[in-house]
Amino acid sequence: MSPTNQLVSEYAARRPVSTNWYERAQKVIAGGVGHDLRHFVPVPLYIQKGLGGRKWDVDGNEYIDFLLGNGALLLGHAAPEILAGISDALGRGTHFGNDHPLQVEWAELIHQLVPSAERVRFVNSGSEATQLAIRVARAFTGRNTLLRFEGHFHGWHDEVVHGFQPPFDADGSLGVAPRVRDNVVAIRDGDLNLLEDVLSRTKDIAAVILEPSGASWGRVPITQEFLHGLREITRRHNVLLIFDEVVTGFRFSPGGAQQLYNVIPDLSCFAKIVAGGMPGGALVGRADVMSLFEFTGDAKHDRHQRVNHQGTFNALPLSAAAGVALLRLVATGQPIQQANSLTEQLRVAWDQVLDQQNVAGYVYGTCSTFHVYFETDPHRVQDASTRHDLHTTDPDRLKGMPAGLIDSYTRHLRQRGVDIMSSTGGVLSAAHTESDIQQASVAFEETISALLDEELIVTM
Ligand SMILES: Cc1ncc(COP(=O)(O)O)c(C=O)c1O
């Protein structure tokens, strides 16, 4: 049996209860899983409980968790402050379909923390936040085209589903009407001259949207100079700048990436951490732009001249309670600082592993995120004198590592009690500990040795 096949069967052998659940799931759940990223061969994880920086599957396997609810859990699993907020709200009912005081408190905290948040409007997810941002931008400018950058992820709705994974010019999904793409222009990030050129030539652009971390929470890094240049150019061309802070919000700083980098967008999208690990999101932005939601009492205006927005579960009381509890702690700066410092330790330790084994690759990331790049192009390895020469910002490379390598890497780490977020990277919480980092570094070291044995990665 090949080492890869052997690993797959050992992986399944450790997860008999999960395998049973997966067999049942495949008979009733379309695609077998609830999110494309959860699909995994031979069996997805079935998690029973989480506490702090760890979680346990239904087979009793323990994991140091660097997925953390797809990045939503800045305080880790079952944080007492969040649970107390939710259970307090729960005693009064789950949902009213009316506004309620916690929604206002939640909005006030966002307004206080996020520089661009003159006004806040709640939604249920990151995808809803970007969808609403695009609608508002079109309404405000009277223009139709959205400019986005290749590789950046903005959710699963029709308008943004293409362009985030290579090949970037291919359709993102079956089922999207071709005309949707007529209103979207996708270009490479990092090139201000290209941006200037496109904005000068294309008069119909309403907004530019991006992840201020760089694509996929920084897997493809961008520079602060690019962000500052982007702000200046979009302002000059009268085009709205939308920051998708669904991952960076309340993780990169209490005021998000916009505060960390001191670049203030016109609109920003939040989800994940903003709702304290519950479903929820927010579109925030300039008061004049967000005034498009306002009612004036004039029948013609209220019917025809505003942005229409409903949503049964907008600002769900339980999400608002979790969000308020979380943001009060975020405001202290302490959880972010704690997560950042642990992640820096992890990045250093994991990069040392690559160094010691002379692996063609490197570890990188910002704040409490980490990514690992493995160079598998023999020409680039041959041309590099040191590992440092392998650094790249090419999205085709950073997002195009072989699928077999990513699968094996993930499987080895899980077998050794570590779960990551996607591709090779993950996020940390304030609940992780130094001993989690040490244990995860041993798992990483063993994973690297195994991948070398399997010849899925190479040395310098
Ligand atoms: C940057 C970014 N934007 C938008 C989304 C979509 O958010 P949701 O999954 O809540 O719809 C995600 C989800 O991972 C994201 O990372």
Image (cartoon, rainbow, N blue to C red):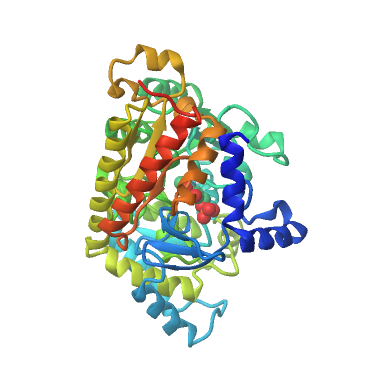
Residue drawn at x 70%, y 34% is 178
| The one of 52 and 236 positioned closer to us in this rendering | 52
Quadrant location, the C terminus: top left
Image spot of residue 62 (x, y percent) = 45, 61
Residue drawn at x 53%, y 41% is 142
Quadrant location, the N terminus: top right
Horizontally, residue 8 falls left or right of residue 266, namely right
Image spot of residue 316 (x, y percent) = 51, 72
Say above or below: 210 vs 327: above
Image spot of residue 17 (x, y percent) = 63, 64
| The one of 273 and 376 positioned closer to us in this rendering | 376
Asked whether residue 196 appears in the rendered view, the answer is yes
Image spot of residue 270 (x, y percent) = 43, 55
Residue drawn at x 33%, y 56% is 250
Residue drawn at x 73%, y 62% is 24
- Tell me where residue 380 sits by quadrant: top left
